[in-house]
Structure formats: C-alpha cells, structure tokens
Image (cartoon, rainbow, N blue to C red):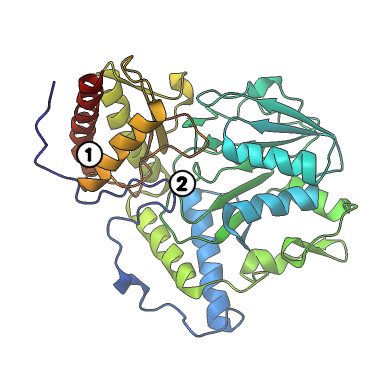
Amino acid sequence: MTLQEPQAKPANPRFSSGPCAKPPTWSTDALKDARLGRSHRAAEGKARLKRAIDLTREVLAVPDTHRIGIVPASDTGAVEMAMWTMLGERPVEMVAWESFGEGWVTDAVKQLRLDARVHRADYGKIVDMASLDYDRDVVFTWNGTTSGVRVPSGDVIPADRKGLTICDATSAAFAQELPWDRLDVTTFSWQKVMGGEAAHGVLVLGPRAVERLESYVPDRPLPKIFRLTSKGKLIEGIFQGETINTPSMLCVEDWIVALEWGKSVGGLEGLIARADANAKAVWDFCDARPWVANLAEDAGTRSNTSVCLRFTDPRIADGAAFAKAVAKRLEQAGAAWDVGAYRDAPPGLRVWCGATVELADVQAMLPWLDWAFHAEIEKVAQAA
C-alpha cells in the first residue's frame, strides 16, 4: 500500500535525543544579557551561576537537604566525579540495561577495579531493582536514553540502606518524578529535557553522599576537576556557584532561560505532563499499527522522553538498513531530524518526546512516519 505524502509538517522537526530541542519560545534575543567577557568569579558571574542553581532547585523540586553543583563535562563528568570520589568504601552493585550504564560498568570494573557485582538486562528491559543489595553502593541509570526504558518508581530502594545510590538521571530529570529521599547522588546534563547547551553537568548530593565524601578518602589519585573536598570537608563553594573550572556564561544564561520557561509551563508538574502527552501520542500510534512497536517490553517501564521503536514487519530482512532508510526519508522530507536508533541499540527509531517538544509537532510527524515506512516496505516488496 502506497500512502500519499502528508501535507502538513512539524513546525519544528527536531526530535534529537541530545542535544534536544530548545524551548518553543526560545530565541537568541533571550541571551542578550549574558555576562560575556566577564569572569565567572566576579560578583555578577557568581550571581548568575547561583541563580542557575536556585532555579534548578525550584523547577526540579529538589529539597533543601540536597546540594546542587554545576560541574564540567556534562552528565558524564558528573557521574565520573561521583564514582571516583565516593566508590570503594564498600562493594558495589553496577546496573546496566543500555549503553551508558555499560559505560559505568566499564569504569567500575576495568578502571577503578572495584569489588563490583554486575546486573544486566537486554535493551527494552530493566533489571529487577528489588533484587539488588542496597547495603552495597548501587550505580544505575534512571532512564535508559538509548533503550527507551525507565525505573517505574523508587519504592524498592530501602530508606534504611547502608550503601549509597548513585543515579544517572540525565534523560529523566524534569520529565519524571525522582524520589530524592532514595537518591544519594543524582546527575544530569543541561542538553536533555530542558534543551540547554552541552558540556555542563549537574551533580545533586544528598546528606549521605556528603557524609561519604567527608569520611572516606579513596586510595586513588583524583584529578583536580573531580575534587569535591578540601581538608576532609566538602567544598561548599561548588554548590554556591563557584565552579571547579571555567563555565560558559553564554550557556549559563541559556540554562536560566530554559528554567524560566519551565516555570512558565507549570514547573515540574507541567513539564512532566508535556512529556507524557508527547510520548502517549507515539505509543498510541504504535498500538494502532502492526508493523511498529515500543522497544520497552513492559508498558510500566516505557520512557516518556526517549521513546525507542522497533519495526516488526516480517518482510524486513535487514532491520538496520531498513530503519536507516526510514530515518533518512524522514530527514530528507523535513519531517523528523535525528530519529535513528543509537548506534549500540537494536535497529529502529528513537523519537525524543521531552518537554521542550510541542505535542502538535509530534502529531504532525507521525503521518510522515506512516508514509516513510510504507514507502520503504514497498521497495522491499518489489525487490523480493
């Protein structure tokens, strides 16, 4: 069946999973007051960095018990900082169900050489979080950006745990509820749900993480950009806007703009609702068609940000080639950019549905996906 090319296109065809779409009201004019050419250590620079931290706390609803710091090297830098400074005091449970979790496993096992027990699940599934030993430290991703699955809740994490929970929440923060009382370390980057610019990470420390930092000295050398303590005490300035290295004040201003937009749409509740509505539009589309399915096998673990899809038509012999052809057709039509699956993930598509994406754009894109699939499957049928 050949479908006619749809008429309407998304006003914004940006569905990349990172860097993600800017807030819909964004323009370069919003950055005109950026403290460019000014020192981040000057009073004005530090004030903007503190404003970015305070707004992060407000929009993300982080309790006052937790400290928030802006750190280098995006989410990766924030996770590495936590692992290198805090792990080793006790055995660790390493959890992986997608490529980034696997990266943390590599660091723990091959680089830090920790006493680690590794728990894995295939793409589209998650590890049984209730089966973990929380008297060990636990390192896990909340939302699998490359696999489209998420932890449904933090209820299974014991309140009386003896180990730390270190959570990579980079594609969950601002789109999913995070149980701050069960997360000792939480990390994310600016370029995900809120559409900020790259290279800056955020490190959120609960009281138990601070206690670990001040009581445990790892037996490994720590690069300067990882050091969170001095003379056995937390460097509090990091969590007041005194960054370890030089941040981009243009990116800081951009982050503030994104957070102000987040407040304008209802804060965390409004941001979650936007992501939920976007994801539901894609889920409903898949449920109504026999040739495409959500990569997440359990509906309760489906991500509402990085929605990963797989093609199920039995006529498709080369899934990777077919998925690339569909993604290329969508891109050439100007209907959806950057929707190919992650390179290490199963063949398919990945549609970012985070809060900065407009529901109308998702709804306008889906008929193009229908069209692209049928155009490519007709080529398969003709070649058979």
Q: Is residue 314 above or below residue 351?
A: above
Q: Is residue 60 left or right of residue 322?
A: right
Residue 183 seen anywhere in this rendered image of the structure: no
Residue at the spot 31% in from the left edge and 39% down from the top edge: 327
Q: Which mark is residue 7?
A: none
The amino acid at mark 1 is: Met
As displayed, is residue 93 above or below residue 258?
Answer: above
Q: Quadrant of the C terminus?
A: top left
Between the C-alphas of marks 1 and 2, the distance is 24 Å
Would you identify the image quadrant in which residue 162 lies?
Answer: top right
How many numbered discs?
Answer: 2
Residue 188 drawn above or below residue 161: below
* Other-residue count near label 1 (Cα within 10 Å), few / some / many at <14 / 14–19 / ≥20: many
- Mark 2 surroundings within 10 Å by alpha-carbon count, few (fewer than 14), some (14 through 19), many (20 or more): many
| Closer to the camera in the image, 172 or 51 | 172
Residue 153 picture location, percent across and down: 55, 28
Q: What residue sits right under mark 1 in the picture?
A: 365
Of residues 176 and 328, the one drawn nearer to the viewer in this rendering: 328
Question: Counting residues from the N terminus, which is met first, the one under dot 1 or under dot 2?
Answer: 2
Instruction: Answer with the quarter of the image where residue 323 lies.
Output: top left
* 365 relative position to 151: left or right: left
Q: From the viewer's perspective, is the residue at label 1 or at label 2 nearer?
A: 1
Q: Of helix, strand and loop, which one carries label 2?
A: loop
**Which type of secondary structure does the marked residue at label 1 adopt?**
helix
Q: Position of residue 305 (x, y in %)?
A: 41, 39
x and y, in percent, of residue 250 in the image: 45, 73
Question: What residue is disc 2 on?
Answer: 174
